[in-house]
Amino acid sequence: MPDAEPGKSPDNPWPVRAVATRLAKYIDRLGGVWVEGQIAQLNMRPTVAFIVLRDPAADMSLTVVCPRDLVLDAPVKLAEGVQVVMHGKFQFHTARGTISLWANEIRAVGLGELLERIERLRRLLEAEGLFDPRLKRPLPFLPNLVGLITGRASAAERDVLTVARSRWPAVRFAVRNTAVQGPQTVPQIVEALRELDADPEVDVIVIARGGGDINALLPFYDETLCREIARCTTPVVSAIGHEPDNPLCDLVADVRAATPTDAAKRIVPDAAAEQQLIDEMRRRAARALRNWVHREQHLLDQLRSRPVLAQPLAALDTRAEEIERVRAAARRDIVRLIDVESDRIGHLSARLATLGPAATLARGYAVVQTLPDAAVLRTTADAPAGTRLRIRVADGAIAAVSEGPADARPEPNAAEQKDARK
């Protein structure tokens, strides 16, 4: 079996020198490149300078080596935090196994170019909706715990703590001291933001820094920081610089404060002002209640002064008298009607008595009825001989038997007349 190609199997490995030599040749073929970044470290040696060039948007860095005179003759004074553009060629140091950029030209990032980049980033973030006012979260009226990200022992930290505690002495802070200038600013602030945003007790986060030029405030224009602020679920207050300063993180934050002092005034209410407001509201409530009571009392007094309530029985007395008058009138009318009807009945009774059969019988007349049907005898033909009769007179009735019509009978003699009289 033929031997494997060198470096392709554990039986035929490359020695370190072979790998290092080949890697050095490969990197050497890359040629020259232009690199932009922030100076994180600068160490001057007698003949050369060692620079750590850091990417402000990511936790990545690159070692740069250049002649000492190149640093001294740079167009701007090089120091930590300065944004520069370098041209050089990468070299692989076979003895140490490291890669560095051998710089042969250094240029400062011009203000106009820097502002143009910031403007392009601003338009990009705005197009993505990170500045949309509808996404801004309101600040709590009284936060349970305030997260403060600022420089250690800085004037911004002192201003926020002093002003906030003077306004509301019971306010609590969770302070995270970070770099606020230089290449370490963005990663440290991002880490502090994530820590405070994950704390359920923190109700609002304040990022505070004093004023400075655009180079000093450059980390707060960083895209990584802006996106991290937009991802926070806790409201974020940006208090960077002074009133004229307006870094991009101000536009992404939920609330922009003109200064750290202004941020302290926004995150907590003024206890004295709130107490005055409460006192004023209590006075207004008491005054409104008194006015309402007086108004209702006046209304009750008016109601009580009305005759119907001042003398509630007067209306009943008036109605009682009216009812009594009506009852008396009705009684008189009824008595009068009864008297009239009584008189009329008396007259009718007298007429009836005069015209009735009783009066006729009293004058000597009689009513003859045939039996048993009690029909009134009207003609002689109705009572032939032997018909039983009932003769009604004024004081009663007698029974008789018909002997027939008087014309058909002979005249009675004297004895019969006598017997008849008996």
Image: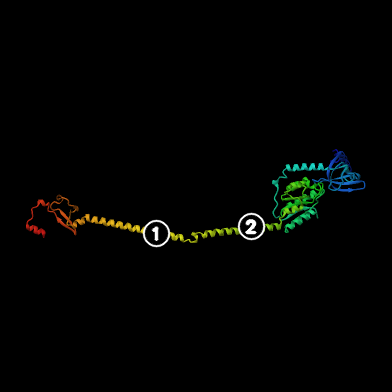
Residue in view at x 77 percent, y 42 percent: 119
Seen from the viewer's position, the closer of residues 148 and 246 is: 246
Residue 260, position as x, y percentages in the image? 76, 52
Report the quarter where the N terminus lies.
Answer: top right
In front: label 2 or label 1: 1
Residue where numbered disc 2 is placed:
284
Q: Quadrant of residue 16?
A: top right
Seen from the viewer's position, the closer of residues 354 and 57 is: 354
The disc label shown at residue 325, or none = 1
- How many numbered discs, if any? 2
First along the sequence among labels 2 and 1? 2
SS at mark 1 in the image: helix
Going by the numbered disc 2, the residue's amino acid type is Arg
Residue 237, position as x, y percentages in the image? 74, 50
The disc label shown at residue 190, or none = none
Q: Decide if residue 247 is on the left or right side of residue 349.
A: right
Report the quarter where the C terminus lies.
Answer: bottom left
Residue 15 visible (yes or no): no
Dot 2, crowdedness within 10 Å: few (<14), some or many (≥20)?
Answer: few
Dot 1, crowdedness within 10 Å: few (<14), some or many (≥20)?
Answer: few
Going by the numbered disc 1, the residue's amino acid type is Arg
Q: Decide if residue 81 is on the left or right side of residue 288.
A: right
Q: Decide if residue 230 is on the left or right side of residue 400.
A: right
Residue 220 visible (yes or no): yes
SS at mark 2 in the image: helix
